[in-house]
Image (cartoon, rainbow, N blue to C red):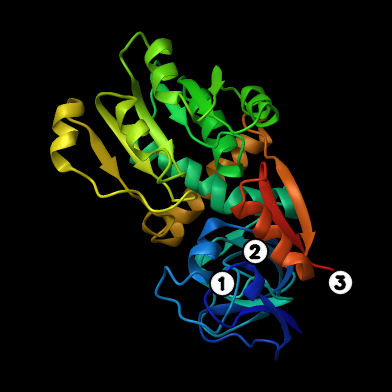
């Protein structure tokens, strides 16, 4: 079968397409035939050597497909069932992957493959960020960086759904229009966002900033916070954040900074299932809408990541498997 391999750390050009043996499920695992794989910044971190995973390894962490084979000690799943995952299935950029059963999400019949794949990593992430990391409340003011991206669009929608006034940043007028269509009250350029937030909030600042940009926005994000505001650092698309001066948190107004990760918010099958179920319900009820901005065949994985890392994408990027 076909699998995308990372033979050495580096840029998108290092991805290699190899023919490998089909996996067999160990105890507690199932083998899934992939229909769609999700493209994520976690894949970038793995490929660049920023995680404990060392090359060579099979790429891909998120997928959606149909169970082909079940290992020992697996209950609640059966061959032919549609399932998705955002963890526990390393090697998801492959025709088939062995996935830990306790990380599987059963996908309802009325949620199609692409919607499910777009809803998992980014939908579950938006869920925990707005319900646990900072519980968004009616009347809050929220700033979402990269508001036209896959996660950004969902954060805008969920925060607005919870009654917040949402501001966003975007790099182009076209991206700004996308963020506004998803519920952002105002969308601004990165160059002057702290000043614009100051104007929009009458000098009060926002309750929370969701920042996946990193180096380019970190200082501005801190300055845009209200007293006792929360900066949620999601990633570093523009490079690592600078060292944090703890005293600056006091001077800025008893501020908080946190760097959460999804793995700590799906620690049990029950927690994962609860979050995924609520995201699926939001989709069913039309409360949130998923944007799939880019689709690439599996063979075109290098192009998919070049676009993602150059910040030329909007919405979710998917790798589509041919059968």
Residue highlighted by disc 2 = 63
Q: In the image, is residue 89 above or below residue 211?
A: below
Q: In the image, is residue 111 above or below residue 27?
A: above
Q: Is residue 15 left or right of residue 198?
A: right
Specify the quadrant of the image occupied by residue 130.
top left
Q: Which SS class for mark 3?
A: loop
Q: Is residue 296 left or right of residue 133?
A: right
Residue neighbourhood size for the residue with mark 1, other residues' Cα within 10 Å, grouped as few (<14), some (14–19), many (≥20) = many
Residue 265 % position (x, y): 39, 53
Residue neighbourhood size for the residue with mark 2, other residues' Cα within 10 Å, grouped as few (<14), some (14–19), many (≥20) = many
Residue 238 % position (x, y): 48, 48
Give the residue drawn at x 57%, y 42%.
279
Q: Nearer the viewer, residue 282 or 250?
A: 250
Q: CA distance from mark 1 to mark 2?
A: 8 Å
Residue highlighted by disc 1 = 89
Residue 72 % position (x, y): 55, 85
Which labelled disc corresponds to residue 137? none
Specify the quadrant of the image occupied by residue 140.
top left
Q: In the image, is residue 254 above or below residue 62?
A: above
Which labelled disc corresponds to residue 323? 3
Q: Earlier in the sequence, mark 3 or mark 1?
A: 1
Residue 138 appears in view? no
């Amino acid at each position: 079968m076909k699998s995308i391999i990372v033979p050495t750390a580096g840029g998108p050009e290092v991805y290699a397409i190899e023919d490998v043996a089909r996996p067999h499920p160990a105890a507690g695992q199932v083998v899934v035939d992939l229909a769609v794989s999700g493209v994520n910044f976690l894949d970038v971190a793995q490929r660049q050597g920023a995680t404990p995973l060392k090359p060579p390894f099979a790429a891909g962490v998120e997928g959606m497909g149909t169970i082909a084979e079940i290992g020992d000690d697996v209950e609640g799943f059966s061959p032919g069932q549609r399932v998705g995952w955002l963890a526990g299935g390393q090697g998801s950029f492959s025709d088939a992957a062995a996935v830990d059963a306790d990380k599987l999400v059963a996908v309802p019949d009325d949620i199609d493959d692409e919607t499910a794949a777009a809803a998992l990593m980014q939908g579950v992430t938006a869920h925990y960020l707005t319900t646990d990391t900072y519980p968004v409340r009616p009347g809050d003011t929220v700033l979402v960086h990269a508001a036209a991206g896959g996660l950004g669009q969902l954060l805008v929608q969920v925060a607005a759904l919870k009654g917040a006034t949402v501001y966003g940043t975007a790099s182009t007028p076209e991206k700004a229009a996308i963020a506004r269509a998803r519920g952002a009250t105002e969308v601004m350029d990165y160059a002057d966002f702290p000043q614009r937030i100051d104007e929009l909030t009458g000098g009060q600042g926002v309750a929370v900033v969701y920042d996946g940009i990193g180096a380019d926005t970190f200082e501005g994000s801190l300055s845009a916070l209200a007293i006792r505001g929360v900066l949620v650092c999601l990633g570093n698309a523009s490079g690592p954040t600078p060292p944090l001066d703890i005293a600056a948190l006091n001077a800025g107004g008893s501020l908080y900074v946190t760097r959460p990760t999804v793995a700590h918010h799906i620690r049990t099958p029950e927690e994962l299932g609860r979050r995924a179920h609520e995201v699926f319900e939001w989709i069913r009820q039309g409360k949130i809408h998923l944007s799939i901005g880019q689709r690439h065949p599996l063979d075109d994985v290098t192009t998919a990541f070049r676009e993602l890392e150059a910040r030329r994408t909007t919405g979710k990027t998917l790798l589509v498997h041919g059968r």
